[in-house]
Image (cartoon, helix red, strand yellow):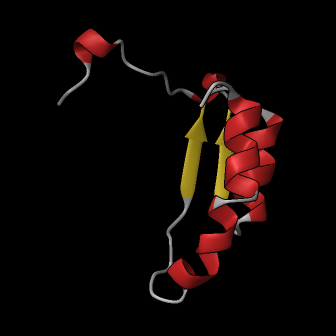
Amino acid sequence: FQDAGALGFHLSTTAAGHFPSLLAVAVPGPFLFCGTVPAELQQAALGMGLDATFAPRLFGFARLPQSEAVA
């Protein structure tokens, strides 16, 4: 997606239409979003009924540089 607004729009429209059938066969666990999460994505996650927690970077998590990521 080009930006957070486009992803948020997709999650709250197209993807959201698939969630009722997915929730009929699976119950998602909690989602912990670490770092800065744009408002559009927060609204989309909560709008889909996800048990979402949004933690700022100060919470203690940081994304590893790609060179340090475990495959």
The image quadrant of residue 55 is top right
User: What residue lies at 64% left-to-right and 25% top-to-bottom?
Assistant: 2
The image quadrant of residue 20 is bottom right
Which x, y percent locates residue 16?
68, 65
Vertical position of residue 43 compared to residue 51: above or below: above
Point out the image quarter for the C terminus. top left
Which x, y percent locates residue 13?
75, 59
Vertical position of residue 53 compared to residue 2: above or below: below
Point out the image quarter for the N terminus. top right
The residue lying toward the viewer, choosing from 3 and 43, is 3
Q: Given the current orientation, which residue lies at the most extreme bottom position?
A: 24
Q: Given the current orientation, which residue lies at the most extreme front position?
A: 14
Judge left or right: residue 43 versus residue 56: right
User: What residue lies at 61% left-to-right and 73% top-to-bottom?
Assistant: 19
Answer yes or no: is residue 57 visible.
yes
Judge left or right: residue 50 versus residue 23: right
The residue lying toward the viewer, choosing from 52 and 59, is 52
The residue lying toward the viewer, choosing from 9 and 35, is 9
Q: How many marks?
A: 0
Answer yes or no: is residue 37 visible.
no
Vertical position of residue 19 compared to residue 11: above or below: below
User: What residue lies at 80% left-to-right and 40% top-to-bottom?
Assistant: 40
Which x, y percent locates residue 6?
72, 36
The image quadrant of residue 31 is bottom right
User: What residue lies at 66% left-to-right and 51% top-to-bottom?
Assistant: 53
